[in-house]
Image (tube, grey):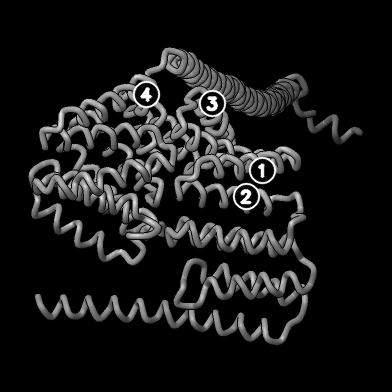
């Protein structure tokens, strides 16, 4: 068994090495072509190289992109330079999880090129810039970037990118509390993505709708949307699946279903290990695993996960919110209320700066619990009052009415789409039945014609045979009659001859002599 394991390990290493060698050879070939080409042709080879080693820092991915940008600008290709700058923003914010560094690239590029072209690449640039601001919790700046992207997408008539922008704006509006606007944008984006069969973004829109419902207390509707999205994305995997599992875990946390909360967090982490967005999503997942186990009296597991959190290089800077939240819950679970208050107060300040109302009221509730544990009823009541005030605002009558209205529209649209699909299926079945009936009809007619032709041919052949037989019979009859006549004539002749001999006897010899 050990030998088999060793052989399998050796095979895997050989396979990986072969793949790496093949990739290195392709990289070397492209670099050779880049070195021997100029201007536009060189840019084409450079683009091919960056696509080949996409997100692979072992081959200096970001350095290659910067070289592309420099060459594109040297040959006056601002559009290509903008596209690659957008790629860096996406790489730093979504892959590396460093949105602040992405914004540094954006600011430097826009400072040198304030008049950007109004094309798809500029839409992507502002779209990913909005993602960077969103990742930092600056929702106002995120919405400004999304608005710029929306204006350009509308101007150039790019429907697909318009849907992406609406999706991002919806996420921000959910955090701000503008549920009606978020619902409208998510429904519109889902419709567009359905038309072009973009499964990943269909799932992202459904995930947004699920989050919208859960933030407003519609957990059953949220779970239904999310389960439908899971059926679409589970065969594919990736970051969208991680997000769905994580959000499902968050809903179970809000409902007090601790077992399901931890189960979905573990699923999220398992899927995230295979995702290209692993670095960006891991801090959030790990910090929540710390919180989940701390609140469920599993301090050893909570501390184990927290050691992994601390090992993340940028956890105290780019991911400080997650770090502080994990620390406050771990301190509270240990009974260290002084540290719990310190980190709880910092966490509340961070969430207020982000203007995320759902996280703010959770932070207020935590401080109320800590003060209750220390016996400070005055401050407990203060934070508890803030908690209920924000919670009540979430259930604001107008927001609920708007949400119910748009939810009804959404369900109606889904029902109408289902009816249209059923009608299409019925029409298709009718068409198939019609074709089948036509085939049966023409097939039957063909068989009938073939059968009639065979009968007619056989009848004609039979008639010919009968005619030949009749002709032969007639000929035989005639021949027989002729033969009979000849026979009768012969017999008559012989009989007459004999009779004549009787009537003419021989002459007497006297007479003969006298003659």
Do residues under tags 1 and 4 come within 8 Å of each other at their CB atoms?
no
Q: Tell me residue 302's x, y (percent).
A: 15, 52
Residue 37 drawn above or below residue 281: below
* Residue 462 seen in this snapshot: no
Do residues under tags 2 and 3 come within 8 Å of each other at their CB atoms?
no
On residue 126, the disc is 2
Q: Quadrant of the N terminus?
A: bottom left
Quadrant in which residue 185 is drawn: top right
Do residues under tags 1 and 3 come within 8 Å of each other at their CB atoms?
no
Distance (Cα) linking label 1 and label 3 = 17 Å
Crowding at mark 4 (Cα within 10 Å: few <14, some 14-19, many 20+): many
Distance (Cα) linking label 2 and label 3 = 20 Å
In the displayed structure, does residue 321 sit left or right of residue 421? Answer: left
Distance (Cα) linking label 4 and label 2 = 29 Å
Task: Please report whichever mark, 1 or 4, sits nearer to the chain's N-terminal start.
Answer: 1
Q: Residue at x 73, y 82 (%)?
A: 37
Looking at the image, which is closer to me, 199 or 401? 401
In the displayed structure, does residue 234 sit left or right of residue 437? Answer: left
Q: Tell me residue 258's x, y (percent).
A: 16, 36
Q: Circle 3 is placed at which residue position?
A: 181
Looking at the image, which is closer to me, 318 or 375? 375
Task: Please report whichever mark, 4 or 2, sits nearer to the chain's N-terminal start.
Answer: 2
Q: Circle 1 is placed at which residue position?
A: 148
Crowding at mark 2 (Cα within 10 Å: few <14, some 14-19, many 20+): many
On residue 216, the disc is 4
Element class at badge 3? helix
Crowding at mark 1 (Cα within 10 Å: few <14, some 14-19, many 20+): some
Element class at badge 2? helix
Looking at the image, which is closer to me, 457 or 217? 217
In the displayed structure, does residue 499 sit left or right of residue 341? Answer: right
Q: Residue at x 62, y 71 (%)?
A: 48
Distance (Cα) linking label 1 and label 4 = 29 Å
């Amino acid at each position: 068994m050990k030998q088999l394991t060793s052989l399998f390990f050796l095979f895997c290493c050989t396979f990986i090495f072969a793949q790496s060698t093949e990739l290195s050879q392709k990289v070397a070939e492209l670099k050779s072509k880049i070195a021997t080409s100029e201007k536009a042709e060189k840019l084409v080879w450079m683009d091919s190289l960056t696509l080949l080693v996409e997100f692979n820092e072992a081959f200096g991915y970001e350095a290659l992109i910067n070289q592309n940008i420099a060459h594109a600008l040297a040959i006056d290709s601002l559009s290509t330079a903008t596209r690659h700058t957008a790629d860096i923003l996406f790489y730093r914010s979504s892959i590396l999880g460093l949105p602040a560094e992405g914004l540094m690239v954006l600011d430097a590029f826009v400072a040198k090129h304030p008049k950007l072209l109004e094309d798809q690449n500029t839409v992507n640039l502002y779209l990913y810039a909005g993602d960077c601001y969103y990742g930092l919790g600056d929702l106002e700046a995120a919405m400004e970037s999304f608005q710029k992207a929306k204006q350009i997408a509308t101007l150039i008539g790019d429907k697909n990118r318009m849907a992406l922008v609406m999706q991002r704006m919806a996420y921000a509006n959910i955090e701000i509390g503008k549920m009606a606007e978020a619902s409208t944008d998510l429904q519109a984006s889902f419709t567009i993505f359905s038309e072009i069969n973009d499964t990943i973004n269909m799932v992202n829109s459904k995930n947004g709708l699920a989050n919208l419902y859960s933030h407003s207390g519609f957990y059953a509707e949220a779970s239904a949307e999310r389960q439908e999205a899971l059926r679409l994305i589970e065969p594919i995997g990736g970051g969208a699946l991680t997000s769905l599992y994580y959000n499902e875990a968050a809903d179970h946390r809000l409902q007090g279903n601790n077992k399901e909360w931890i189960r979905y967090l573990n699923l999220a982490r398992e899927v995230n290990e295979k995702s290209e967005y692993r670095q960006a999503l891991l801090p959030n997942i790990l910090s929540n695993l710390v919180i989940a186990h701390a609140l469920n009296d599993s301090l050893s597991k909570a501390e184990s996960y927290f050691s992994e959190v601390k090992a993340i290089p940028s956890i105290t800077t780019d991911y400080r919110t997650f770090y502080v939240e994990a620390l406050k819950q771990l301190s509270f679970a240990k009974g260290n209320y002084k540290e719990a208050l310190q980190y709880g107060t910092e966490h509340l300040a961070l969430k207020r700066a982000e203007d995320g109302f759902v996280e703010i009221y959770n932070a207020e509730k935590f401080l109320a619990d800590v003060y209750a544990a220390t016996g400070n009823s005055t401050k407990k009541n203060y934070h508890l009052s803030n908690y209920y005030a924000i919670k009540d605002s979430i259930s604001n009558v107008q927001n609920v009415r708007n949400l119910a209205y748009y939810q009804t529209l959404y369900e109606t649209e889904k029902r109408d789409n289902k009816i249209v699909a059923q009608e299409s299926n019925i029409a298709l079945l009718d068409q198939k039945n019609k074709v089948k009936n036509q085939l049966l009809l023409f097939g039957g007619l063909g068989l009938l014609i073939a059968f009639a032709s065979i009968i007619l041919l056989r009848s004609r052949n039979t008639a010919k045979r009968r005619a030949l037989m009749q002709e032969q019979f007639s000929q035989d009859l005639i021949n027989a009659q002729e033969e009979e006549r000849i026979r009768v004539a012969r017999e008559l002749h012989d009989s007459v001859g004999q009779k004549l001999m009787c009537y003419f006897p021989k002459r007497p010899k006297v007479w003969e002599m006298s003659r």
